[in-house]
Image (spheres, rainbow, N blue to C red):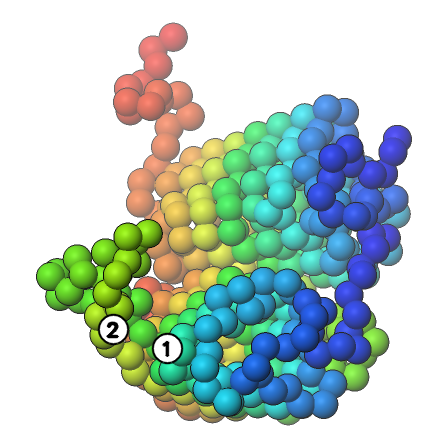
Amino acid sequence: MSRTIPGDWHNGYIPNNAVVGDGAYVQTSWSFQLCRSRRDQAITLGENSSVYMRCMFDMGVEAQLIVGAYSQVNGLWLICDQSVTIGTHCLVSWNVVMMDNFRAPEDIPSRRRMLEEFAAGRDRRLTPAIKPRPVVIGNNVWINFDCCILPGVRIGDGSIIGARSVVDGEIPPYCIAAGNPARIIRFLSEKEDSLGRHNQT
Amino acid sequence: MSTPSVDWMTPWDGGTLPGGVHVGENTCIIGKAAFRRFRGQLADALVIGDQATMDGVQFSVGPAGRITIGSFCCFTGAVLMCELSISIGSYVLIGWNAVIADSDFHPIAPAERILDAVACSPAAREPRPKVLTAAVVIEDDVWIGPNATIFKGVHIGRGAWIGPGSVVTRNVAPGTRVAGNPARPMEES
């Protein structure tokens, strides 16, 4: 398989440790320029999934990203040092920030040290100074624009996260959550239609 | 591995720095869009200290605006909108898509806002009406999360932590953790 993308505006290629499933669409190699994961399979894009132009995968050496089949990732700003998993049939809108690591330590002397090492480094990449906490997004989850998904978050199957929400902690399956911090607005039934009517069949 | 083509040795990979922009030793500004909205007229419209990294930052500076940034700062993808004064200390970290603005952008009064809409239109003839501004101050060691917004007149004390997605409209005391919209101090956990 060719690692360049026809018509790509960015002069780059898809890294060899990214596995692109059958029928999956990747708009530009620009999204991968901050991926420095050394895992054999750093990025897995499921079949018929799509990764659009405004995605940026900033991944550390141990990082692993999995995007499930049929998921559409429109504009995901990803910071991943260990593991971020997005299920199947998910919709991720623009400007969504998802991180499994804040990277910068809380205490000020170590943060200063990190910034000094960063400025002295040849390629200016932040070396994470704290432990990552994996992010797990279930299947059929819809995350609206400008949301922040913080380290350690788990979102259950079928849930919706409203625009500009900040999610910290756990969101159960089949609910609508929104706000900063995100709270559950209501629960969804697996069987209801868009008008809230329950399917009798 | 994808090919990073960034030259970290030049002050700005987009070419020659505009007039009024001064950067210290080993400071670099990355991204062609950095000065697309830079209209600063002051001799010190943007002054950045040493060892700082401004990756994908947009400096939207008006004719009277003045931005000062200390040393060892690391900003990624932030938007700084300055009509008066934004001063940022050293060792400040700012995450993706954060916005810092020291003005209201447009007048509050409806009649003035009509004049402003005309002055901003392709048919503009008169200058824009005055817009309220108030200086923003961010002290040393502040951490600002991605998608956070800092509005005019805000003073953020040393070592404060601004949660991702926060909208900060009031002063933040030194060493405090705030989050939410509007941002409020977090409960101790």
Quarter that holds the C terminus of chain A = top left
> Callout 2, which amino acid?
Val
Residue B19 against residue A83 in the figure, above or below: below
Q: Quadrant of residue A44?
A: top right
Amino acid at circle 1: Glu
Q: Residue at x 53, y 59 (%)?
A: A150
Q: Residue at x 74, y 47 (%)?
A: A10
Asked whether residue A82 appears in the rendered view, the answer is no
Q: Kindly identify the residue that appears in the image at 76 percent across and 61 percent down.
A: A60
Tell me: A93 left or right of A21: left
Taking depth in this image into account, of B175 and B58 the one nearest to the observer is: B58
Residue B131: which numbered mark, if any?
2
Q: Are marks 1 and 2 in contact (CB under 8 Å)?
A: yes
**Looking at the rendered structure, which numbered label has been put on residue B83?**
1
Q: Are marks 1 and 2 on the same chain?
A: yes
> Is label 1 in a helix, a strand or a loop?
loop
Residue A155: percent from left, percent from top: 51, 45
The part of the image, by quadrant, that contains residue B109 is bottom left
> SS class of the residue under badge 2?
loop
The mark that comes first in sequence, 1 or 2, is: 1
Q: Number of numbered discs present?
A: 2
